[in-house]
Amino acid sequence: MCEQALPDSRRLIWIIHGSLVLLLLFGSACHRGDSLSRSTEGARAEAKKWQADAQLVQIHALNFVMFQGNPPVMKSGPPQMVTFYFFSPSTHRGFHVDAMPQGLQPHPDELPSTPFTLPLPDNFGSLDEALAQVRKGNGSDILVTEADLRVYWNAGGQPERTAWKIAFSQGSGITQTSLTQYVDAASGALVTVEDRSVPPPNSGMTEGTPPTDTDFAAFRQAADQNVATRGAGFKLYAADLGFRLPEPVYDGPEKPGSKVKLSMTHFEYARSTPTVNWESVDVELGTASGIAAEAVLGASIGPVVQQVPPNAIPHLFPDDLPDPEPFLRELRESFPKQDQHTPRGLYEAGGYNFIEGAAIIMTLAQPTARAWLGRQGEARPMFGEPPREEQYGFFTSTAPRDRWEWWTIVEHARFVQKRGHPPGSNDPLEGWEQFIYIDAATGARSTRCTTPSCIYNCGLAYQPPPPMPPVPCE
């Protein structure tokens, strides 16, 4: 045990050109490791007061540069600030403790101050040992600027090694260079580390093989194959589908057993990392004509998306749910029928405006609508043609709780006849939205409607009728 007295130079506060440089955090070289250990133990104790499951995940040391001599010369001294970062797996929250010359300063974090979640081992090589290893190969006159200890993981997301990352500079003036080296915290050897916490590059759209059919299973298989080229571990968490509504006028009767024809799909995949971040990939697949699959296929990897409490990584779609084909057909059949004998509405992308009054609006050819796969309580989808924020808010507040749902929105409208007047096109037009949910596991169906409101020709003549619209809303 080292018991020699601290040299006077380590017990003074140097005053250089009016600036104070504090040199007392870790004392002499023989005590620095012990002092860091004591600070670590104190920080752990503070964190346990905050959350019983708090885990130390990172140590970050700064402010190594000091002045010595006359005239003063910059040297590397002990760090003047060391921050200990903790993470609570049960709350997904953070906590950090600053170790400074005046003592420990704890800081509870509603949002983690560090993204890392893998716990440091109970025993690890000291900072002094790591610095000595770096100086052995680079000279004792290097200027250390930063030191960081954390767990690095392999391609499978498993802990690979715990290492000190030492940033320093050599030389002076125009010849000064900045370098970084890693020291294994178990063996004390210099090592090469691949930092997988760096966000993956967005390589943009990639070519792919379009599906051979236009049903959901074909599109899903093509999307799964495409996302597999971006790395392992990605799983589906949201889907956005554009599908054709059959038009007997143009298509003729539908063949028995035929599947719902999709025209455009967006699949969102995610994978977790040993951080509070997660990575996402959006795969877009489409058919150029909406009828036959053509070469419109691509995928773009998004940036690392940071999700912090309470929005952690989204729930991933289970592999054991049944084929959604009958559910998609039921959603499609929820849209009012249109044929050559009763042309009474207008299909639009994402909905259907159903006119129940006297006016007739001709139908567009090959109408399309949208359907989504989502889970109540999750963040709003980011890609494709997601519902508007207020629509997604309605879904979140009315859909079955914590359930995977296939759902769509049917837009309705009707003319409200003025009192004392025959029906006519000058009547106010009233609209509302019908949300239809089908449980992705059980097929249970439920529906909710928004409150009707005037959307055209509104004025004093418009008085909302008391009954709910004539559509099945529970």
Image (cartoon, rainbow, N blue to C red):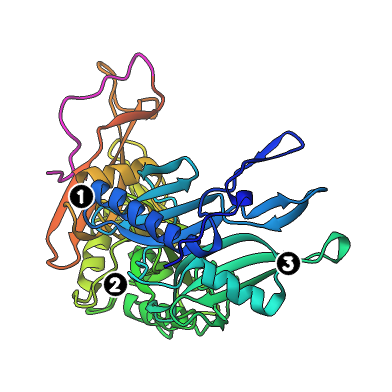
User: Residue type at mark 1?
Assistant: Ala
Question: With respect to residue 57, does 363 lie above or below?
Answer: above
| Residue numbers of the magenta segment | 459-474
Q: Secondary structure at mark 3?
A: loop
Instruction: Examine the image and state in which quarter residue 202 appears.
Output: bottom right
The label shown at residue 253 is 2
State the quadrant of the N terminus: bottom left
Say whether residue 318 is magenta: no
- Amino acid type shown at disc 3: Asp
The residue sitting at the front extreme is 4
Work out how far the residue at label 2 is from the one at label 1, CA to CA, in angstroms. 33 Å
Separation (CA) of disc 3 from disc 1: 65 Å
Left or right, residue 168 beside residue 244: right
* Mark 1, residue position: 399
Which callout, 2 or 3, points to the residue nearer the camera?
3
Q: Quadrant of the C terminus?
A: top left
Of badges 3 and 1, nearer the viewer stands 3
Residue nearest the observer in this picture, 247 or 319: 319
Residue that extends furthest to the right in the rendered view of this protein: 174
The disc at residue 50 is: none
Nearest to the observer: residue 84 or residue 412: 84
Identify the residue at image location x=53%, y=67%. Answer: 128
* x and y, in percent, of residue 146 in the image: 60, 59
